[in-house]
Image (cartoon, rainbow, N blue to C red):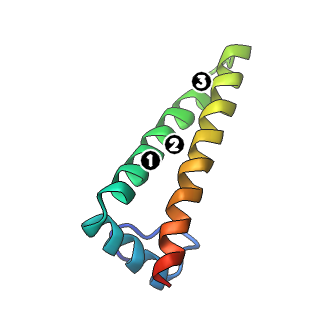
Amino acid sequence: MPKYQKRGESMKDSNLVEKLLEGDDEFKKLYFEHRKLDDIVKGLEEKDSISIDDELEIKKLKKMKLSLKDQMEMKISKLK
């Protein structure tokens, strides 16, 4: 499995992701920001007790992640 391939991602897409990570600084920034937000969301969701504030923060972070993913997908689709 290539270095950046995710489950369910085709080999072609993972190759495009690798290519973009190596040559597109904006994509690289989007990619690592998405991963950072993912880690934060997972941390919040793993808490024993999730407060209302945590739930709101999780929703906000997930929307941000989705926006980043949409931007990355646009860049990937341009290379297909």
In this image, 13 relative to 51: left or right?
left
Give amino acid for label 2: Asp
Q: Earlier in the sequence, mark 3 or mark 1?
A: 1
Mark 2 → mark 1, Cα distance in angstroms = 5 Å
Q: Position of residue 40 (x, y in %)?
A: 49, 33
Residue at 29% x, 57% y: name it. Answer: 25
Say above or below: 22 vs 15. Answer: above
Residue 38 — which label?
Answer: 2
In this image, 65 relative to 18: left or right?
right
Q: Position of residue 71 (x, y in %)?
A: 53, 57
- Label 2 sits on a secondary structure element that is helix
Q: Position of residue 1 (x, y in %)?
A: 39, 77
Residue at 46% x, 85% y: name it. Answer: 12
In this image, 68 relative to 17: left or right?
right
**Front position in the image: 60 or 43:** 60
Mark 3 → mark 1, Cα distance in angstroms = 19 Å
Say above or below: 14 vs 59. Answer: below
Q: Quadrant of residue 41?
A: top right
Q: Are marks 2 and 1 in contact (CB under 8 Å)?
A: yes
Which residue position is annotated with label 3? 47
Give amino acid for label 3: Lys
Which residue position is annotated with label 1? 35
- Label 3 sits on a secondary structure element that is loop
